[in-house]
Amino acid sequence: MDMALEIKNLRKEYKSFTLKDVSFSLPQGFIMGLVGPNGAGKTTIIKLIMNLIRRNAGEVKVFGLDNLKGEAEIKSRLGFVHETPSFFEDISLKDIKAAVSLFYKRWDEKLFRSLIVEFGLPLEKKFKKLSHGMKMKFSLALALSHDADFLILDEPTSGLDPVFRRELLERLSGLIQNERKSILFSTHITSDLERTADYITLINHGEIVFSLPKDDVRERWGIVKGGKELLAESYRKLFQSIHETSFGVEALTLDISAARRVLPAGAVIDRASIEDIMIFMDKGDVRA
Amino acid sequence: MRNLILKDLILNKKFLSYVGLFYILYVGVFGSRIDNPKVDIIFITFLSFILPVMIYTREDKFKATVVSCSLPATRRQIILARYILGWLLMLIIYVLDMMAILVAPGHKLGAADLFNARTIFLALALMTLYFSILMPFLIRFGMVGFFVFLISLQVLGVITLTLASKKMLNLDIKAWVAAINNAFMSLNARLGTPGYYAFLLAMMLLLSLGSFVCSVFIFKRKDL
């Protein structure tokens, strides 16, 4: 299978944060959601892929090419949206488009114009006059208008109203119908992932918790609720994370079928949503 | 490369037009009052150098370097484009400023004073010095760092001159200037005029190349 993205042992050290030897990959033709709480390291990973920050160790390959050695070639096939779109503030959208479109051989002016109309963007307006949501829409229009093979979107749905967010996610799903295209997008809105992603990579405190096909997460991860008897040593090994509440015990398992076989009849076992996993992660240590 | 230069021109076209026009009018008025070609050249080369600096500080101000670095170009190409565009702008604005002086009513210097081999080489040497020394600094420390550096230099200059005038510092600036002048004159005498200018040109190219390599080194390591 051809890979859009391969990351191996990627490391970035800051004074107060370290991205710790992250590894995951995304096959071509799929959407991967990069999810995690604020400050988990999502933007750091994206910046490292884009060579906006310097890595301390590890390897990033995009379309099989090293992201540093093949930088210009890779970026000509990438569409990128930064979490805080930052163009020259005193310039009109028309001029920004003129400056950016120069770089892409496959720039589709007709598509750009149609996106501008669809997104309700005023081309003559200066960038600084736009709201955050409008800036994000403009940034998306630029990223979508040059037939990119791989879209890297950092929090693309932040600041967008729910209707547009839904439309955007549908558009992203539509894009990968052409099996050549791939999408990596970071978010902390877990419903966006449930709706769109084929793969989910969960990150916390600079470490990958898991990077799995969404269906695997759905089928394997579960929430168990029950009495204190679940704290027994024979059950504990089934749980990735366990919390005692005033009513009993709540636990996270990554083997829902084993949990159903082994746990006592009183235990309530449900499939875990990404949000459930993130909440458990917030309370303690979760490992896949 | 061409695209990177065009991008900067498109994004700064209004700024360049307004500031460029102001430069020409300002220099036309004030430069034409000066009767010493060296003073005119020092004054105008520095103004010419500030113009490309302002473009790059604008990018810094709007945090738009992230956009430049996400486009299909390497960091080395981005710096090379900055150097080429910077030099183009400096030369264009310098020539336009000089012409403004010559057409300003009551100008005190003629074309022969401003456009001869000596003044052209002096202008090129000063622009090379400003650009080569300060560009890596600008790339490393950004807009705020750059201006803090320039202001610090001025403050240091004032303190040094004050101390020297009160005899608290043994500093003979005139002797230094004379020594540098003598060094150039003896070099000219030894190499002959064509050889001397070729030597100066080679030094300028070497300094620019060194500055470019230094800027690329810094920019490649910069986290955005």
Image: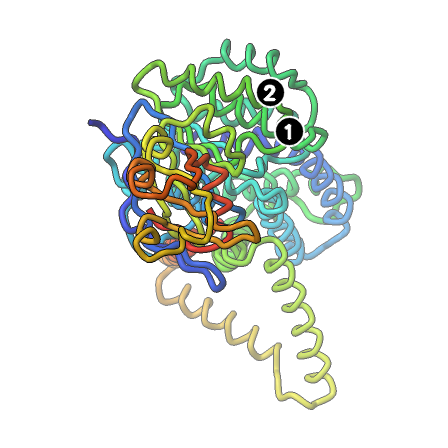
What residue sits 65% from the left and 68% below the top?
Answer: B152
Q: Residue B83, can we see it?
A: no
Classify A78 as above or below A123: below
Specify whether disc 1 shares its chain with disc 2: yes
Disc 1 and disc 2 in contact, CB within 8 angstroms: yes
Please identify the quadrant where the N terminus of chain A is shown: top left
Q: How many marks?
A: 2
What residue sits 70% from the left and 23% below the top?
Answer: A125
Badge 2: chain ID = A
**Badge 1 element:** helix
Q: Position of residue A151 (x, y in %)?
A: 41, 28
Q: Position of residue A86 (x, y in %)?
A: 58, 37
Q: Position of residue B88 (x, y in %)?
A: 51, 39
Q: Residue B127, can we see it?
A: yes
Tell me the amino acid under the disc marked 2: Phe
Q: Position of residue B80 (x, y in %)?
A: 41, 43
Q: Which mark is residue A65?
A: none
Q: Is A288 positioned to the left or the right of A196 in the image?
A: left
Badge 1: chain ID = A
Q: Which mark is residue A133?
A: 1
Q: Which residue is the site of mark 2? A: A164
Mark 1 against mark 2, which lies toward the viewer?
A: 2
Tell me the amino acid under the disc marked 1: Gly
Q: Which of these two is toward me, B158 or B170?
A: B158
Q: Is A287 positioned to the left or the right of A153 in the image?
A: left
**Badge 2 element:** helix
Residue furthest to the bottom in view is B168
Q: CA–CA distance between discs 1 and 2?
A: 10 Å
Judge the density around disc 2: few (<14), some (14-19), many (≥20) Cα neighbours within 10 Å: some
What residue sits 37% from the left and 58% below the top?
Answer: B199
